[in-house]
Image (cartoon, rainbow, N blue to C red):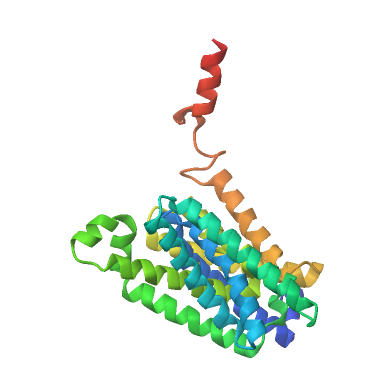
Amino acid sequence: MPIDAFFEPLQYGFMQRSLAIAVLTGILCAVVGSYLMVQRLALLGDAISHSVLAGLAVAFILGVNIFVGAFIAGVLSTGAINLIRTRSPVKEDAAMGIVLSAFFALGITLITLVQKDNKIDLNHFLFGNILAVTGSDVRDTAIISVFILAVTVLLYKELHFYTFDKLGAQAVGLPVNLLDFGLTLAIALTIVASMKAVGVVLVLSMLITPPATAYLLVPRLHQMMVLGAAVGVVSSVSGMYLSYFYNLPSGPAIVLVASGLFLLALLFSPRHGLLTHPAGSQQPSPLLQEIKRLRK
């Protein structure tokens, strides 16, 4: 890319604000998403991200800050999941699916009703509209990012122990229930901070894809966070430039770049790459083994 083309978007205020949001979102999603990855809680992130749509709609109807409504809806959806999981025989993954679909359907219904009397663009909520961010949006996202990153640094040892050995953490006296709730709040805040960039539908990709890319390349959690943040920033900034020069929707462009980087890591990772890892050291997949047995 010519140097003039690189600096061209930066002369516009809306692009400066958009790139600031993109960088903050890339870092924040990777750090929080790393905990979701190693704890296998991707569906929880999906449930919360879809649930916030109902909070957005209710807040818009009541005339309050839509981000406050989104955050409250995220916390309520997690409480509903825990209630179903602990007070009924329904398993956690089923509870997440039930709550996700119910809150998302409620949000779509309320927004559809609101659209009859007000001009509200549903696509902006679902897929983001980073080019329309304001200075206050940048400020709010920066505050959320600094807060979550500071807590992560201060409590890194405790969070690390809790992440990989929850029973051991409980045995030594760590407040695992409080840490569970704190992780839920962090997810909800991250989704609220990322809505302008990629929307509630695509935010899960930014929570999972950059840390998953790093997971294929590095062995330790802190390395995964740092490399995942780098992948998130590169994806967000590259997606913004693609959106600017080729008139693409910004949220999907960011996610497509992140997915492309994951594909490269999947193919060429030194430890796990499909093309670089020696094929002879890998056992045939269980499915292929069963097919071979049936053919004999």
Q: Quadrant of the N terminus?
A: bottom right
Judge whether residue 1 can be spotted in this image: no
Residue drawn at the location 51% of the way across and 54% of the way down: 212
Q: Looking at the rendering, which quadrant does residue 148 occupy?
A: bottom left
Q: Image check: 162 left or right of 206?
A: left
Q: Image check: 41 left or right of 153?
A: right
Residue ranking furthest to the left: 172
From the top left corner, tell me how far across and down residue 88 is, in percent.
Answer: 40, 54
Residue ranking furthest to the front: 88
Judge whether residue 11 can be spotted in this image: yes
From the top left corner, tell me how far across and down residue 245 is, in percent.
Answer: 79, 70
Residue drawn at the location 70% of the way across and 63% of the way down: 252
From the top left corner, tell me how far across and down residue 258 is, in percent.
Answer: 61, 59
Count of labels in the image: 0
Above or below residue 279? Residue 99 is below
Residue drawn at the location 56% of the way across and 46% of the way down: 266
Q: Nearer the viewer, residue 150 or 104?
A: 104
Above or below residue 168? Residue 69 is below
Q: Nearer the viewer, residue 143 or 185?
A: 185
Residue ranking furthest to the top: 296
From the top left corner, tell me how far across and down residue 127 is, in percent.
Answer: 69, 68
Q: Quadrant of the C terminus?
A: top right
Above or below residue 269? Residue 135 is below
Q: Image check: 166 left or right of 278?
A: left
Residue drawn at the location 55% of the way across and 50% of the way down: 265
